Image (cartoon, rainbow, N blue to C red):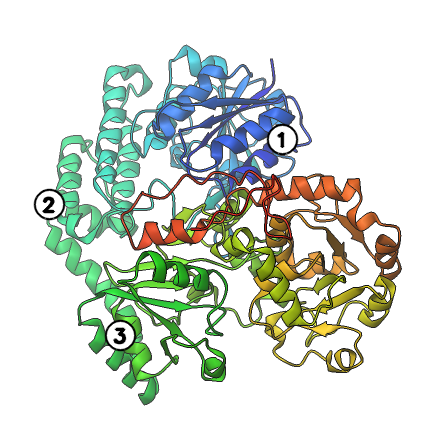
Amino acid sequence: MPRFSIVIAAYRVQGYLRACLDSALTQSFHDIEVVAVDDRSPDHCGAIIDEYAARDPRVVPVHLPVNSGPGRARNAGVEQATGDYLLFLDGDDTLAPGTLRGLADRLVLNEDPDILYFNHVRTYWWDHAEASLFGELLASAGTDVFSVRDRPEFLRLFAMSSNRVYHRGFYTRHAFAFSEGIYEDALLSYKTMLTARRIACVDLVGLEYRQRRTGASTGSPGEKHFVIFDQYARLFAFLDDQPHLDPKHTLRPLLFERAVSHFLFCLDRDTRVAAKDRRRYFRRAAAWYRAHLPADFAPPADAKWRFNALACGSFVHYRVRGLFARSGDAARKLRRIVRRPLAVRAKRALYKLHLRRPVDPRLALYSAYWDRGVLCNPAAIYHKAKELAPHIRGVWVVRNSEVASLPDGVEYVVPGTRKFYRTVARAKYLVNNANFPNDVVKRPGTVHLQTLHGTPLKHMGLDQQRYPAASGGMSFRNLLKRVDRWDYVLSANQHSSEVWERVYPGSYRILEYGYPRNDVFFSATPDRIAEIRAGLGIPAGHDAFLYAPTIRDYQKGFTPRLDVERLSRALGPKAVLLVRAHYSYGKRTGLERLQEAGQVIDVSAHPSVEQLCLAADALITDYSSIMFDYALLDRPIVVYADDWETYQATRGVYFDLLSGRPGDTPGAVARTEDELIAVFRDGRWRDAEATALRTAFRERFCPFDDGHAAERVVRTLMLAPDTTRPTLPPSSAPRRDGRERDGREPVAL
């Protein structure tokens, strides 16, 4: 029998669940079991739970046949629990290191109380932590063991499910269970505290209570929030049925104050009670107030007017007082608007004028890499839409400097112009692999697709807050405003789905369709590949090696991390070295001299990285996301990581690329220039070990790409919904000659 049974309810928390499980399983106190309950989550929660159960026998997986809500999920976990104590966690929360050891020691000291409360810290999505308000109260208990009849002030502890451990015998003996609906944890919290005869506290900050920007069960308004009145009615009915718990009715006034404060907390938040529902919610709260008002109840001094408004049932009084309190904030906002430059206000006025016109259902607006041209995933979607949805007119946003390089026949608008504002205001479909400007409004009926442009190894989105070199000048508030416009986000693998959900918190739907830009890998014919190679100047019979390093946030300008001239010589006379600097460096790569000398071919300005991948017989990279796409081709990948420790410290990474573990490392690894040359000299770049690593890497990161990603996107966005073909993994990766590995010709759409 383990000391702790940690019950974790998981629903739509794939981006956080690994951290939750890791926080429990890596505790210094090991005598635990983790009962992880998949509440029929539509994402990868179930697969993550099974993955952890397969490698750690302390994990007990539970899969519910239907989604039942957090209360029933926790109840199902309790049925499987065998430990002395129950600890409930939500799948997006974590335990601080050392928590279980501290709790175990205090349980021994207090001789196994019914409930042991501990402290928590709120962690916010903007990388801020906030101490709870209950540290002083918890500390005041010292080592005492008591009941709330002795210490009623402890009813003010935060009524949640995760800041305490329950003795399982006490919990099951009284047949406690979570009720249906939200706010179920408040009801159970008070019922268990009222019943317990032996309560102990410790001021140990053990729970990291995550405040998600979106996705929480209480984070969206609706009828579900009205269940709060039923939950607290059940609490008072519970007291009525067991009068011995409060024989002198000394606890009821405090419980009443807690309940009404909870009602008012929800009433004041748009994320819980919508404006259209507030009057009705207020009436329900006022009726509950009158029905449960204890004798001689005195409202708290700091909220007296709010309680009095409920007591007399005057929503008008409540609203007027609230508007008065908010009027100062509105005036300050108006002054900021007036101070904006005249030109900015003029553009906003023009844009607002176009926003009054109807949305054009036959107009799609595309952009890639901050308006650099017809590129990447948006380009593949654009071309497929022309084929499958020719009634949709596609227009590109392209900066002035790139207009001359556009393919013939491409319709475009230049950002910031009148035509741009007219087009962006009226387009039904907006497709981008970066972001449209901050002032673009998400109109009802429009569809925004964020394709992104790579699988994340380095930290992205909100995770960049911890790395100043990677986030200099970045406004995370504006980032989240842009995220709120997204309806769909593309993902190429489960790893990406988990990361995107966490670092770009929003209400969008993730489409695990693969990357449309990679469709060309499956349709390219041998003749087309030969044409690309000839166009790049690769002589027939030569091997082409593509060196594509990523950007370094801690340095300015492109400086090759290795002596490319030396590497070119080491590869031999029958090899060609293609060098591609990151697009952020512009056209100043410093490679002109080497290209003139015939040592390398500078492909930094080449418009299609996909064509470069098709042309190359092997890839040399460091931490660039190109490796995840190139793995589809099943050709050798060599990682040259001379500054791995510095890169981790300045940017952060999601997994250890150099570990050598299958699924983490795509091929041979070199840490120095000499090691890199030796990798090619000794043949390790394409030996059996490198091939096995590449196979595992491809299986992990390329499960959805099969040559039809763009088609799935177009059908989902622009044609009948839910008619996409299943997102099955490709049976095999395409070879360089354009045939699939079993010899079949690639399927043409």
Choose mark 1 or mark 3, whichever is in front: 1
* Residue type, numbered disc 2: Gly
* Residue type, numbered disc 1: Leu
Q: Secondary structure at mark 3?
A: helix
Of all residues, the one furthest to the top in this rendering is: 173
Q: Secondary structure at mark 1?
A: helix
Q: Which residue is located at x 10 percent, y 45 percent?
A: 312
Q: Are marks 2 and 3 in contact (CB under 8 Å)?
A: no
Q: Which residue is located at x 87 percent, y 64 percent?
A: 570
| Res 320 seen here | yes
Residue bearing mark 1: 25
The mark that comes first in sequence, 2 or 1, is: 1
Residue bearing mark 3: 331
Label 2, label 3: how many angstroms apart (C-alpha)? 30 Å
Q: Position of residue 175 (x, y in %)?
A: 37, 13
Q: Position of residue 740 (x, y in %)?
A: 58, 44
Q: Which residue is located at x 43 percent, y 66 percent?
A: 435
Of all residues, the one furthest to the bottom in this rendering is: 342
Say which of 314 and 376 sits in front: 376
- Does residue 510 appear left or right of residue 206 in this picture? left
Choose mark 2 or mark 3, whichever is in front: 3
Q: Residue 384, relative to residue 437: is it above or below?
A: above
How crowded pointer 2 is (Cα within 10 Å; few <14, some 14-19, many 20+) is rated as: some
How crowded pointer 1 is (Cα within 10 Å; few <14, some 14-19, many 20+) is rated as: many
* Residue type, numbered disc 3: Ala
Say which of 409 and 238 sits in front: 409
Q: Secondary structure at mark 2?
A: loop
Q: Quadrant of residue 536?
A: bottom right
Q: Residue 145, relative to residue 716: is it above or below?
A: above
